[in-house]
Amino acid sequence: MSRLPYRLTVLRTILVLALLSGFIAAWPQAGPAHAATYSVLFDNAHAETAGNADWIISTSQPDPLAQNANPQVETDWTGGISAWGVALQRTGRYSLKTNTSALTYGNTGNALDLSHFNALVLPEPNTLFTASEKTAILSFVHNGGGLFMIADHDGSDRNNDGYDSLRIFNDLMNNGGAGNDVFGIQFDVLNIVSENPNNDTPNPDPLLQGPFGTATSSIIRNGTTETINPADNPNVHGVIYRVGFSNTGTTGVFVSRSTYGSGRVAAVGDSSAIDDGTCSAGNTCYNGWNDPAGNNNILFPNGTEWLVGGGGGPTPTAVPPTATPGAATATPVPPTATPIPPTATPGTGGTLTNGGFESGLTGWTAGGAALPSASTARAHSGTHSALLGATGTEQNGDSSLVQTVAIPASGTFTLSFWYWPSTTDTITYDWQEAQVRNTAGTTLASIFKICSNAQAWTQVTYDLSVYKGQTVQLYFNAHGDGASDPTYMYLDDVALTTGGSATPTPVPPTNTPTPVPAATNTPTPVPAATNTPTPVPAATNTPTPVPATNTPTPVSTGNLVVNAGFETGSISPWTTNLGGGSAVVGASPVHSGSYAAAVTSGASAGGSGGPAGGGNCSGGVRIPITAGRSYAFSGWILAPTGTSLASARIRVAWYGVCSGGGQIATSDSNLLTTATGTWTQVSGTATAPSTAAYAEVRLYAAPSVASAIQVYFDDIDLH
């Protein structure tokens, strides 16, 4: 029998098997990377594109694939965060959509209901979530969804409604009906000008080590941080911290994560990190996504990957905190409090004694009608603080503390301190204040003078570099009028730090300057040939102080406001109405003269509205000013008894042009928050930004309910 047919049969079998093997090998395999398709919803229903922001993945909404079905580079989709979307889309594992209406959970009639998604991204929202939206978001996370919260700095109120993103997030986490601080995360009320946080947790972390690579740092270009609270949620962890803070601590956290129920939460303190520099026409962007000082193009995709997975991440190993000389401590402020930002990056050195009052009042000189005392009733850190004023029977006069310090002849020097104020009076009669004086006791600069009942620890920083080579007095005081309405404050952690004699390399400011009517404090970025800022060495970085909290005694220029007392009988030049508000002139009540302005707010609860103007520049109603000069502003406000008042204030907005254009920054007076039916003065100080040429004065009233109120303003002053 011939063996040839058998051999041919075997050969054919081998060939068939080989072909099948090759065919199978060539067939696309379903490996771990493609085991699931994740659905992520990016929100654009809460003013994420207000002002100069453009936090969208594509102009095609809800489906970005309608713009380009196979994006390969960030410019294939149009939007300030298109790079983030494209990075996820290219994996083949993500389905992305954009939300443009109210967020829901369990609404079968809504194709973009959160029940259809694995994660929700909230990129710097600028309007408050409604009660039903807060319930939807928290329920979504509790049942296994992921939530990415990206905030921005204090004052980045892009749509001018009285709420910036950090306050909106704090409202969600505290007032969502599920309790306070449900994630164990609170955004700090700060404006950190420029830093490169790279102080990572010492433990493995899925946001740092993930499928998109290894991230070690991020950027802050006008942003904030979080304070984490393990007592409120034991699953909260810090991921990236500011330099100078313990990387196992609870403060100075720039990137954090937590779990809530079966879901996951991530939080970041600056939208500059997600900006890819390719926003829609008419907006100015900054490429923070590819900033060489950070690894944001890895960090945020890794964070998304962790969020869509559900469940909890690894638990960090407890590591003793590392003491860092001069490190500051950021304390979260409740969403309703408005502290004075920001925090200067601490350095070394300083000649101040016993700033924490742990040794009583050693090093300080006490004076006044009621001598201050060291107290254990409240402390920002340690066990002691100083109490200025009386908590019981009110003193009739001052209660002051003074320390004399020598400012070295070279370097940059920053005073920082924390205070906790309380009062039931008005600034006409009582106040809390801080000053810089010469050794004869003459006031050189007023750091602040307020009458505040915030009852929360608030940090103030103040640049003392102008007094280099001089000996000055630091003066703190609580003044009462003996009328049985005590005004006092606790003082703690007074420190003088230095950034050394080197001048930091300038860094282009945040990517998010905000045009009218937004109320952001974000300066206009400085163009760079490569659109890449020079990283600032962390050890020498000294942020530029925020004008509202760091101004020398204003130069007297006379009142610059036109029709400041409304004595023309006309509201002109207060003719720009903001926030749904308006104003008319009336003959009663008045603070002085024959007329005052009756300001009607908008009808949004907590939203500020009213007229703006105050000047007669050519072609507009703004006031010509001098860049870099210090100004004081004030006015008198009366809220009739029974008015549903949330707050009333005076705001100064700084512009580079007489009419139109984008505002550069804003500065606020202290708030009037009680409707007593009496005239009360509010005031503030500020330094005009270096690029400003005009000021717009705004008279704001905000109701505590969803109904318009009427508040009276008179005798407005800017000088």
Image (spheres, rainbow, N blue to C red):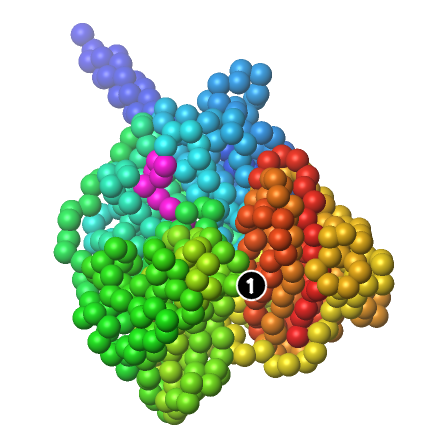
Residue placed at 33% from the left, 50% from the top?
Answer: 227
Highlighted range, magenta: 180-190
- Seen in the image, is 231 located left or right of residue 188? left
Q: Nearer the viewer, residue 149 or 564?
A: 564
Residue 212, image x and y in percent?
36, 46
Residue placed at 84% from the left, 70% from the top?
Answer: 618
Residue 281, image x and y in percent?
69, 52
Secondary structure mainly formed by the magenta segment: loop
Q: Report the amino acid beneath label 1.
A: Thr
Above or below for 232 versus 582: above
Residue placed at 33% from the left, 22% from the top?
Answer: 20
Above or below for 299 versus 174: below
Residue 72, image x and y in percent?
53, 45
Residue 193, image x and y in percent?
46, 65
**Count of all numbered marks drawn on residues in the image:** 1
Q: Which residue is mark 1?
A: 428
- Seen in the image, is 440 located left or right of residue 97? left
Q: Residues within 10 Å of mark 1 (few under 14, many from 20)?
A: few
Magenta span has 185? yes
Which part of the image, by quadrant, shows the C terminus? bottom right
